[in-house]
Amino acid sequence: MPSVIITPAAVRDINRLVDFLRQRDAVAAKSVLSIISKHIRAMKSNVLAGRPTEVYPLFELIISFGGTGYVLLYREAPGSNTRYILAIRHQREINYKH
């Protein structure tokens, strides 16, 4: 089973996204945090989580939420069983911040 490490940049992204949503809907903010956490936990047991990007060894994991969702960017360390979560953004954001 892969191990998953959340980088400080990804933690900041999660906090930013939840804080943004909390200003509009506190219940939805709590729900999105729960859903993101669930997907991160699932990455530990699902070897096929995510889709490859154009840049190896980067992958994206789509997290649906309501009519949109979030995109989680992670890297698989070559030769190891570790996944590093690098960034997460709302699907309507233009670029990852990492």
Image: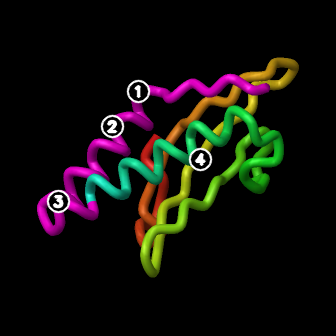
Residue that appears at 81% across and 18% down: 80
Query: What range of the chain is rendered magenta?
Result: 1-28
Residue that appears at 68% across and 30% down: 83
* Badge 2 amino acid: Arg
Q: What separation in Å lies between label 2 and label 3 (alpha carbons)?
A: 18 Å
Residue that appears at 41% across and 66% down: 93
Contact, mark 1 vs mark 2 (Cβ under 8 Å)? yes
* Foreground disc of the pair 4, 3: 3
Which of the numbered marks, if any, corresponds to residue 26?
3
Tell me the crowding category of disc 2: few under 14, some 14 to 19, or many 20 or more residues within 10 angstroms, Cα based.
some
Q: What separation in Å lies between label 4 and label 2 (alpha carbons)?
A: 14 Å
21 relative to 61 in the view: left or right? left
| Residue for badge 4 | 73
Q: Nearer the viewer, residue 77 or 70?
A: 70
| Residue for badge 1 | 8
Q: Is residue 97 above or below residue 28?
A: above
Q: Main secondary structure of the magenta part?
A: helix
Secondary structure, mark 2, is helix
Spot occupied by residue 47 in the image (x, y as percentages of width and height) = 82, 40
Residue that appears at 48% across and 27% down: 7
59 relative to 26 in the view: left or right? right
Q: Is residue 2 magenta?
A: yes
- 1 or 4: tag closer to the N-terminus: 1
* Badge 4 amino acid: Leu
- 4 or 2: tag closer to the N-terminus: 2
- Quarter holding residue 86: top right
| Residue for badge 2 | 12
Spot occupied by residue 29 in the image (x, y as percentages of width and height) = 26, 57
Tell me the crowding category of disc 3: few under 14, some 14 to 19, or many 20 or more residues within 10 angstroms, Cα based.
some
* Badge 3 amino acid: Ala
